[in-house]
Image (spheres, grey):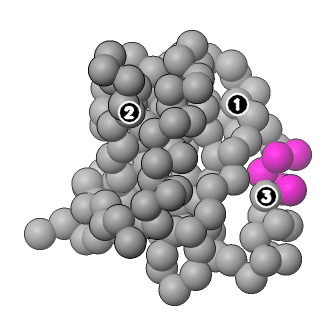
Amino acid sequence: MPPVIPIRRDILDWLRAEAIRYPAHECCGLLAGANGVISAAFPARNVLASSIAFEIAPEDLFAIFRSLRAAGLEHLGIYHSHPSGPETPSPTDIERAYYPDAAYFILTPRPEGKARVRAFSIREGLFAELNIEEV
């Protein structure tokens, strides 16, 4: 059975809504919490403004990490959307997975208006799906 990544239901709902809010380009940001449970989302600007790639604005990244430290939260994940799929990490996602201990969430909008959310561990060029547990 794949490892589990616990996330608060309201944050998971927020991620689904975030993917639908940005249908033309990949949205992105960081996820944080305490005791291994994701309880906060920190949206960031995608400086690429692309539908097939993302790069978090460096000033946003630094500000988010300062906020995490100030709030006593730990960095637990990174999220971004794939507006037109696939629902798995792309070769670029794998290449740029700089945080091996983070869960990588991929959000994919669906025609029926609800986004699919999947999470992955990405290490040493390989990825494995994580089970998302709503808490």
Q: Which residue of the protein is positioned furthest toward the left in this rendering?
A: 1
Is 135 on the left-hand or right-hand side of 27?
Answer: left
Residue highlighted by disc 3? 64
Residue highlighted by disc 2? 115
Question: Which of labels 2 and 1 is toward the front?
Answer: 2
Q: Quadrant of residue 106?
A: top left
Where residue 59 appears, x then y in whole percent?
A: 88, 46
Whether label 3 touches label 2, CB < 8 Å: no
Q: In which quarter of the image is residue 72?
A: bottom right
Where residue 135 appears, x then y in whole percent?
A: 38, 72
33 in relation to 89, above or below: below
Secondary structure character of the magenta stretch overall: helix
Which secondary structure, mark 1? loop
Can the viewer see residue 94? Answer: no
Q: Which residue is drawn at 76% across and 70% down?
A: 68
Which secondary structure, mark 3? helix
Where residue 121 appears, x then y in whole percent?
A: 36, 59
Q: Which of marks 3 and 2 is nearer the N terminus?
A: 3
Q: Nearer the viewer, residue 63 or 127?
A: 63
Q: Which disc, if any, is residue 46?
A: 1
Is 1 on the left-hand or right-hand side of 118?
Answer: left
> Magenta stretch?
59-63
Question: Which of labels 3 and 2 is toward the front?
Answer: 2
Q: Label 3 vs label 2: CA separation?
A: 24 Å
Whether label 1 touches label 3, CB < 8 Å: no
Q: How crowded is mark 2: few (under 14 residues within 10 Å), some or many (20 or more)?
A: many
